[in-house]
Structure formats: structure tokens, C-alpha cells
Image (cartoon, grey):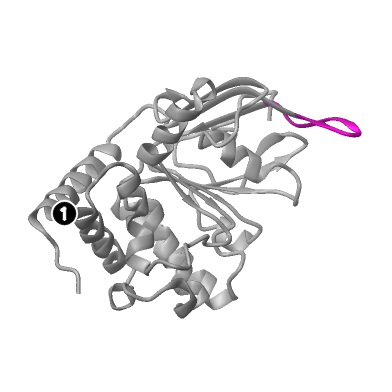
Amino acid sequence: MIQTTPAAASQASRFMRESNLRVQETFPIIQVHNLEKTYRTARGSLTLFQGLELTINPGELVAITGQSGAGKSTLLHILGALDAPTAGTVHCASTNVATLSPRKASAFRNREIGYVWQFHYLLPEFSAVENVAMPLMARGINRRQALDTASNWLREVDLQDRSEHRPGELSGGEQQRVALARALVGNPRLLLADEPTGDLDETTAGRVFDLLERLHVTHGLTSIVVTHNLDLAARCTRTLRLEGGRLHATGKTPAGEAPTAGIHPGRG
């Protein structure tokens, strides 16, 4: 069994201090202005977004809903520096991600963004703890310390007794919990989750979302969840529907904010 080293304990303490500071931030963590995304296809141009506006404040847990093909996943990719917009500005975690070079975008993602997808994308030849440690080793942290920190995160998602199991030996819900630990092991500021419960049965999906909510609060995250599950969306701070290339406010909004918070009047 992996034992926690002083270095890993010190890193965990630093991560907690940073998380506590995040919840005190007042400036928006995401500001998108006049976003456009157009693809060239054999049949001509396909425009997903035009004049899209979005503001998300620190600590929010925001759901994005909409029909399949509306561009929800593409929007997450742009916010997380996996894709570039055709036009517009995208500020995420105080960085204009639309202008980053591929190398700087990769470093930004490793430092600031945690991703969870519908399919876990765990590496089958590695154990759960090794999968969780991958982002830290990619950052240059030595293997021993990375594994210790990963072990702590498996404890956070209640999988400490599965640390040496490979993905094929875990249930679907367990695999997604490993994926969530991997997304958060580097203490990112922003969590992007694309249908994180879409491949799970209703009961397991509820448990995974319970865990996501708990980690969102305890680690001072700002989180965006793309989902077709309106019951889960209703548990978020607010819900935005992507339709016609723009975001439309729906459901509840944070206390003290107007119903159109996060969307500029006349644009959403």
C-alpha cells in the first residue's frame, strides 16, 4: 500500500490553502465575448456559435443543456483550450486561451483545467493510482510524490482499496470516480465535465454527481457540467441552454443576480 510522504502531505496542504483562497475571488473566472465558431465542410460552412456571451463567477456550478449537435462539447473544448474559436475573446482563469500556442495551451490545461468525459478514457495497462498520477508526472513531479498524491485523491473518491486495480477490474461507476480523481489531482481552478454520468445507470449516476458536488464545494472549484439529465442540471447553481448558437438562461440564478446573469442583454 502506498504511504503518504511528507512531500505529498505538504503539497496537499498547499492545494487546500489555494482552494480556500479561490472561494474568496471576486472576478469572473470565465468571460466569453462575441464567440464565433465556424467549420468548413464539404457542403459549405457550418456555424455553431455566433455572438455567444458567457460569464461565470468563481464557485459556480453551472449546467449547460441543449440538443445533441448544438455545440455543447465544442464550447467546453474552447473554454479549456482544446479548440480555438473562429472569432471572439475567451478569458479563462485570467488567461486569454484563444491566443495560446499549442505548447502553452497544453501547460495551461495541465495547470488550470480538470476534465471529465462521458467515457473515462483510463489507460487500461495502468493501475487506478497510476492513471490518477499521470497529470502530475506530465507536470514533471517525481513518480513517488505523484503516486502519493494520487493515492490521497483515491481516498477522496472512496476508492483507496482499489488503487492497484486496473480499469478492466473496476465497475463503470468506479472508473468514472477514478477519472474524477485524475481530473482534480493537479488542483485545477476549473472543472469541465462533459456528460460525466451519461454512460451510467440512474442510481450510479446520482452517486457520481453527489461526489462531484461534494468535491466542487470542498476544493473551491468552479465547475461547468454538460448534461442531458435535467434533474441533475436542476441541482446546479444555474442552468444555461445552448440553442441557436447562443446561451439562454433557464432555471434558478445565484442570489442577487438578474435572470440574464452571464449573458449580455440582446445576445442570449
- x, y percent for residue 220: 31, 46
- x, y percent for residue 244: 78, 36
Residue 198 falls inside the magenta stretch = no
Q: Residue at x 42, y 32 (%)?
A: 29
Q: Residue at x 63, y 61 (%)?
A: 229
Q: Describe residue 239's horizontal placement relative to residue 219 as left or right.
A: right
Identify the magenta region. Answer: 39-51
Q: Residue at x 51, y 70 (%)?
A: 206
Residue 43 falls inside the magenta stretch = yes
143 or 205: nearer the viewer: 143
Q: Describe residue 76's horizontal placement relative to residue 150 as left or right.
A: right
Tell me where residue 127 sits by quadrant. bottom left
- x, y percent for residue 82: 55, 37
Number of marks: 1
Q: Residue at x 32, y 74 (%)?
A: 164
Does residue 98 show up? yes
Tell me where residue 26 sits by quadrant. top left
Q: Classify the position of the N terminus by image quarter.
A: bottom left
Judged by its main secondary structure, the magenta piece is: strand
138 or 153: nearer the viewer: 138
Q: Describe residue 262's horizontal placement relative to residue 74 as left or right.
A: left
Q: Describe residue 156's horizontal placement relative to residue 34 as left or right.
A: left
Q: Residue at label 1? A: 8
- x, y percent for residue 98: 54, 23
Type of the residue with mark 1: Ala
Q: Which residue reaches farthest right?
A: 43
